[in-house]
Every structure is written in structure tokens, then in C-alpha cells.
Image (cartoon, rainbow, N blue to C red):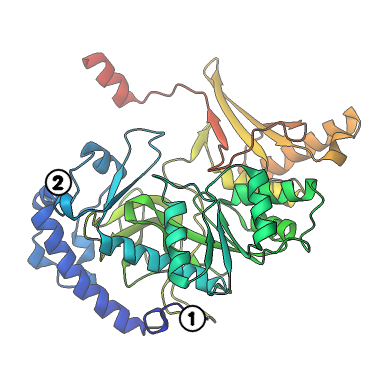
Amino acid sequence: MKYFQEKTETMAPEEIRKLQSEKLVRQVRHVYEHVEPYRWKMDEAGVRPEDIRGVEDLPKLPFLTKGDLRDEYPWGFLAVPRKDCVRIQSTSGTTGRRVVAFYTQHDVDLWEECCARAIVAAGGSEEDVVQVAYGYGLFTGGPGLNGGSHKVGCLTLPMSSGNTDRQIQFMMDLGATILCCTPSYAAYLGESLRERGISPEDNPLRAGIFGAEPWTEEMRRSIEKTLGIKAYDIYGLTETSGPGVAFECAEQAGMHINEDHFIAEVIDPDTGEVLPEGSRGELVFTSLDKEAFPLLRYRTRDICILSRRKCACGRTFVRMTKPMGRSDDMLIIRGVNVFPSQIETVLLKEGYAPNYQIVVDRVNNSDTFDILVEMDEAMFGDTVSAVTGREKALVAAMRAMLGIGPAVHLVAPHSIQRSEGKAVRVIDKRKLVTEDENFLNRKN
């Protein structure tokens, strides 16, 4: 099975654009009539539903941000009566109020179809056993891939995250062939299998579908080697439904965006200007079919590049690169922009596993920048002078990549807490207050 919905996934580009235009016109009307906060935004921008006649008019519409959704928590962006909703999913809320996304049964069905496309693109069929080790509950990872696996007809192991001993037991006993989880947990499972004497050739896995956190090409190759699989990327946000907004095919050359359900734009994060294909910028999504929680021009804060170059898999949907960082979680250290993905790239190139933590603090009005990196067992047995030499080499490699030199600390194996969900890579201890916040504090 090469495609889950071949006719749709191989539509001609002009047919995709026509379909998107028809759906966009309907969706803008639906949002304007039923979502008061967005109607205010349109009215303020001087835009009426009749002004939107197709995809070419999309830039006329105002942007939405996570802040807008939090301000209207929980019901403000609900576009249907509550009785028509069958489910909610939610963001973690670790940096503020949660965002609660609502789903009608139609929304759930379409979301699961998107995830089914991802599973089939990774080579999945009704013959496969899919082990879903994403978290379940409010987090979208588990429910999305679980539903997609059912749509394909796979035997589904709804493991959720954690309990690694049980994960490995079921993987081996039930012959799991496709693993779905975060890349950091996939790396941890590979490490755990090796510690138990289970080689890549001995486990039944042949593919993995990993998302929910950033990961580099170097990390992909490391996971593929450790688990003996082909590792596929998947992308999504709770706000737009969850995983399955975009997915990789066997070419592993970018993720195909499900354009029959979403319009993707790349903008300049500072000016909001729409950038041409091939430009690096912030990804923006418009949901074309969501009934309960339809978002128009939602700013993801993820930085990527879009490409319409022909893909050998035959799918015609536009492709997006892996997110190259985020416009809102980039670290500014001593005036230098630093992305965690850059640090991971250096570590993997230098032969270290992706077990690390970045600690930033401010002492005497100056930023401190420390990176803790785990050694493997062989390195741990080195002399003190050898370990010091390794640290100096990493500092030099980091400086070459970042333009700034961190303090690198090689630490004992397994001393950095493992994550069974999203990895906690950054600890920023600085108490940074903006001028605007200072002003508000004085006023209050």
C-alpha cells in the first residue's frame, strides 16, 4: 500500500489550489459568523468575508497567535455549539494558560485520516503492528497515531509513554513493526534495548514515526542505527488538530503537508510579509476543514522552508523541512542567537549521544552558558586529562557553530534525567524582564 488516499495525495497542483480556494471561502464565512474574537480582528483589519475569493486573498486576513487563544480560554474560539463537540485536546500549558482545542466527530475522523496517511507513507499496512508510545490523554500524540493506526487496519498497541520494561516486553512479544513516539524516547528505547543485550537485528521494528519535538538529521541517523529502522518525521500542533498535519514519505526529503486540509505559508517573523517558496521563515497554517476549532493564519513560531519540487514518491503536496528552530524559544545569550538544534548537531557530529542539557543563568549582569553532555561507558573510563581534552574540543566545535563558547561539562552516563515524553533540553534560570513588563509592574 503506497498511499492511504491515492487520488487526493496525488492531485495536480492546480486542482489542490482550486480545492483550497473553495474551502477557504467557506471557512472564512464560518469563522466570521461564529468566532467573535476573530470577527473583531477582521473588522479591525477592514476585511469582510466577501473580500476572500480564493487562496490569493489569504494575506488580507489577520494572523492568529497562541496568545490570542490563551486570552480567550477556554470557549472564545469555539465555532460550533458545545453539544456538537465530542472531544478536547490541550497543550501542556508550561509557559502560560493552556490552549484547549475542540473537535467534532468529523474533525476527529479527518485528523485520524491524516495520521493514517503518515503511517502508510512509512510503509505501514494492515499487516503491521503499531506500538504507540506517545502520551495519551490531553496530549495529541497518542490519540492521533492510535486513530490513524486503526484507520489503516494495523494491530495497535496503545502503550502510552513510560514504563520502558513493559514497552520492550510488548515490542518483543507482540512483534511491533512500527514505533510511534518522540525522538528522544526512541533514542532512550534504543539505549535500553542495547543495555539488555538486544541488538537492532533482534528487535522486530522496521520503521518509526517520530515527532512532537525538534530533532536533527544526525539524531535521525543515530536512532536508525541503534534501532535498526527507517525513521520518519511527523509534524502537527494541538491548535491545528495534532500530529499528521505533515508527514515524511520514504524519500525522507521533507514532510508533505496535507494541503486538502491545511494551507501553509512562510512569513518573515518580524514583518509578517509572505515569503516566496524556498525562503526560510515562520510557518503559518490555515485550517480548511476544522469545524469546532478552525484557525485562520495561525502563527506556529516554527522556522522552516517550503518546497514544491517534485517528489519521487508521487505525492504532490508541498513539503516542509524539519523545523529549524522557533522564533519564540530561540535563546539569546550574550547577544547571540542560539538554537538547541545547533548544539545537538555538534554533539552528534562529534560522536556523542543526544543526551544533553543546556543551562543558562545570569550572574553579575552577565549570561552564563553551560552544556552538560553525557559520556558513554568507554569515555567515562578515560583519564581526567583525556576528559578535559574532550571538553576543550567540544567548546571549540560549539564556538565554531554558534559564535559563542559555552562551558562544556562531560558528565557520567545516565546522570541526565531521561524523558519519556518531550525532552527537557533547556533550563533558563535568568529572570529576564522586558522594558514593557517593567513599565506594567510600575503601573500596577
Please give the residue where the numbered disc 2 appears in the rendered image. 37
Residue count near mark 2 (Cα–Cα under 10 Å), binned few <14, some 14–19, many ≥20: some
In the image, taking residue 350 as reference, residue 241 lies left or right, namely left
Would residue 345 be visible to someone looking at this image? no
Q: Residue at x 48, y 68 (%)?
A: 118
- Looking at this rendering, what residue extends furthest in the right direction? 383
Specify the amino acid type for callout 2: Pro
Q: Residue at x 58, y 47 (%)?
A: 341
Q: Nearer the viewer, residue 46 or 317?
A: 317
Residue 20's x, y, as percent? 26, 73
Which of the two discs, 2 and 1, labels the residue nearer the N terminus?
Answer: 2
Whole-Å distance between the Cαs marked 2 and 1?
Answer: 39 Å
Residue count near mark 1 (Cα–Cα under 10 Å), binned few <14, some 14–19, many ≥20: few
Residue 360's x, y, as percent? 56, 28
Q: Nearer the viewer, mark 2 or mark 1?
A: 2
Which picture quadrant has residue 367?
Answer: top right
Specify the amino acid type for callout 1: Lys
Q: Nearer the viewer, residue 134 or 245?
A: 134
Q: Is residue 255 above or below residue 132?
A: below
Asked if the residues shown at circle 2 and circle 1 are in contact, with their CB atoms under 8 angstroms apart, the answer is: no
Q: Residue at x 16, y 69 (%)?
A: 25
Q: Residue at x 29, y 77 (%)?
A: 17
Query: For residue 310, which numbered disc appears in the image?
Result: 1
Circle 2: element type: helix
Q: Nearer the viewer, residue 262 or 116?
A: 116
Q: Is residue 17 above or below residue 334?
A: below
